[in-house]
Image: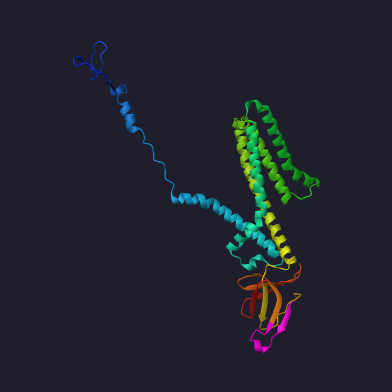
Amino acid sequence: MAVVGPARADAPTRRQPDGTARRAAGGMAGHIVTMPDSLGGGGGRQAEQQSPQPEAPRRVSFLDMAAYVLAPGTAVIGLLYYYGNTYTEAYYSFFGIPPGDLQLSVQAYLVKSPRAIFLTVWPLFYFGLTLVMLLVSVDNMLAAPRLVARRRVVARWLLVSGMLIMLAPWLFSVLGWWVGGEPGTSVSLLVTAMGSALYFSGLWVGPAAWRTSPGGRRMWLFTKVMYVGMVAGVLFWFVAGEAAAAGRQDAESDAAEGFKNNPEAVIHSRVKIAHDAPGITVADEGSESGPYRFRYTGFVALAKSPTHFYLVPRDWKSGEVVVILPDDGSFRVEMRPT
């Protein structure tokens, strides 16, 4: 390594034992000093040569961006399919029709899912957003160092309240006081989720030492994992139960209103149809009307599979029959809007 200064031209040069040269300086004149590599003279050049160059930032490819979008989207589509299937199964089971016989497509289940979950998910989303806003507001109001004692009081109140609310459905069910019945009902699951949210809020509002100490960090991580798992599981079963309830409710409502949104089905048959459906009229139009001489009116098309028609009378009551006709050319069906 060399240190360069304004050296005098007439300064003598001295040869050192190790082979390096040193120019003597006179007075306050500059000088040139060359150090051997063994003392670190070449270390700077070697370090400069061996220092790694900074890598260019990795560009995000189109596949990476697509994965960020499709990965959560796949989970959402799976949930929508499940809830749509739950709703459809509850709806047609009310009429005694096995949903698997209808051979509905995936798109049909997805279309039915908003009706199954919107009225349930929207209030839950609103409640969760309100809880987060309140939690942030309380955290900001108690951020001053002089309010540490009050912060502890609020945090302990949230922890105790959350624990009691989480355990309340189970304790009341064991003692026979809980109106919702056994643990696992919709009300019990929702109350459990609310209690876990309050308990999590208590740990969040509590002093930072609760989360930064060695034991506190482990407890904080464990609580976050348990909170996310519990809330996800509780909401999954709660929304599934509400989707099934919505399917049964819509089936009852459609039957009570006389299937006003379903088209009327007029059946033209080659032979007489044996059925026990009330309110159906039949007319024999004779051989002049062609091969389909028997005309049946009063039916409503409830559903259609690739191979069968599912028909009910307009004034169908719970427990009455559903007429199932094969779509094999023996019948001709006319659909008329109501």
Residue situated furthest front in the rendering:
338
Q: Relative to residue 192, is residue 243 depicted above or below?
A: below
- Quarter occupied by the C terminus: bottom right
Q: Is residue 77 left or right of residue 318?
A: left
Magenta segment range?
280-294
What residue is at 72 percent from the left and 36 percent from the top?
A: 160
Can you give x and y, in whole percent of width and height, for residue 303 in the image? 65, 69
Can you give x and y, in whole percent of width and height, for residue 134 in the image? 66, 39
Q: Examine the image and state in which quarter residue 317 appears.
A: bottom right
* Between 334 and 74, the one nearer to me in the picture: 334
* Between 183 and 195, the one nearer to me in the picture: 195
Residue 236 shows in the view: no
Can you give x and y, in whole percent of width and height, for residue 12 in the image? 19, 14
Residue 73 shows in the view: yes
What residue is at 61 percent from the left and 61 percent from the top?
A: 111
Q: Examine the image and state in which quarter residue 300 appears.
A: bottom right
* Between 108 and 46, the one nearer to me in the picture: 108
What residue is at 79 percent from the left and 49 percent from the top?
A: 179
- Quarter occupied by the N terminus: top left
Q: Relative to residue 171, is residue 31 depicted above or below?
A: above
What residue is at 58 percent from the left and 62 percent from the top?
A: 107
